[in-house]
Amino acid sequence: MDERLHRHLTPADDGRGFAEAVLFRATGPLARRRQAAAEGPTWSLLEFWARPWLIAALLLLALGVAIPSGPWGGTRPTADAGLAASLLGATTDSDVVLSVALGN
Amino acid sequence: MEPDAALVARAAAGDRESFGALVIRYQESVRRVARAVTGNAEDGDDAAQDAFLSALDRLETYDPSRPFGPWLMRIASNAAIDLVRRRTVRAALPLEPYVASSRPGPADDTEAAEIRRELAAALAGLPERQRAAVTLFDVEGYPHAEIAAILGVPEGTVRSDVFHARRTLRKVLRAYGPELTEE
């Protein structure tokens, strides 16, 4: 039965005309694909593989800003810290007055 | 012979020759399945063309680690079934025999032509999925599991479809001698 069906359904031509017809209809899509390939990677490609990394990097940056006391925050010296040190190290009242006047 | 995956990769970049090579390589199988489902050569070839163009549109969804044939056959079966459903009015008209488009040969005598007409009529009497299933199984040689993946139905359904389609076709062929009804 399969032999009969095979013979019954197989086209009589060699398929070249059919292929030409398909290729004619595919001219536009193939040209668009060539153009896309020539233009190289696009944002859509970047989005496809890089978006998770981009989002992760932005989240880490936001965390760094929101929580400055973390290991990424570091310590920032302030004028108040310098003033406190000067006051504690002063031996006389005049030194204290001088430190305050100088803003140390 | 160049592997399908290499041709697909170049076709995806717009290479006309590579896409043409894929069309030439698979046109006969795709046209056979499409002809079986649609019931006539012209609609079958229309559906087969649509299938190749649809495949070109979706080349990015093809997994190169898997065979290209079943992936393409799935698109072809769906294209043919869609076309049949779009053209139900036309399908209701008397079916054209395949005589004009079938391969001529030594058996191309009156009786053979009569058998083909009967086969065409018997195929046309089957539901589209049964036509696709029996063609994929008996003509293209795909196993049941692969046909299930191609048609998107359970394997048991494919076995049932093939069984019922064969039984119907055997009834037609029985009139032409027992040797034609062998599986």
Image (cartoon, coloured by chain):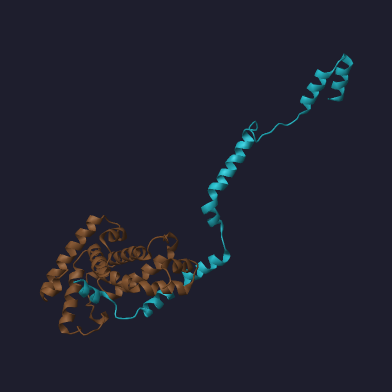
Q: Compared to B164, does B22 lie above or below?
A: below
In the image, A34: left or right of B141? right
Q: Position of residue B14 (x, y in %)?
A: 49, 69
Examine the rendering and report whether any part of residue B125 can be seen: yes
Quadrant in the rendering for residue A98:
top right
The C terminus of chain B, quarter of image: bottom left
Q: Residue furthest front?
A: B1
Residue in the picture at 39% in, 73% down: B23
Image colour for chain B is brown
Task: Write the residue at 25% across / 65% down.
Answer: B137
In the depicted structure, whether residue B90 falls above or below residue B99: above
- Furthest toward the top, the residue is A93
Residue sitting nearer the eye, B136 or B46: B136
- Would residue B25 be found to the left or right of residue A41 on screen? left
Question: Where does the image place residue B180, in percent across and percent down from the top left?
Answer: 15, 74
Residue A49: % across, % down: 52, 52
Q: Is residue A85 left or right of residue B21?
A: right
Q: Eyeballing the image, is A8 above or below B85?
A: below
Residue under the image location 30 percent in, 60 percent down = B146
**Image position of B86 (left or right of B65):** left
Question: Viewer-proximal residue, A2 or B31?
Answer: A2
Residue B35 location (% of width, % of height): 28, 72
Indicate the colour of chain A: cyan
Q: Quadrant of the N terminus of chain B?
A: bottom left
- Any part of residue B94 in sight: no
Which residue: 17% across, 62% down?
A: B164
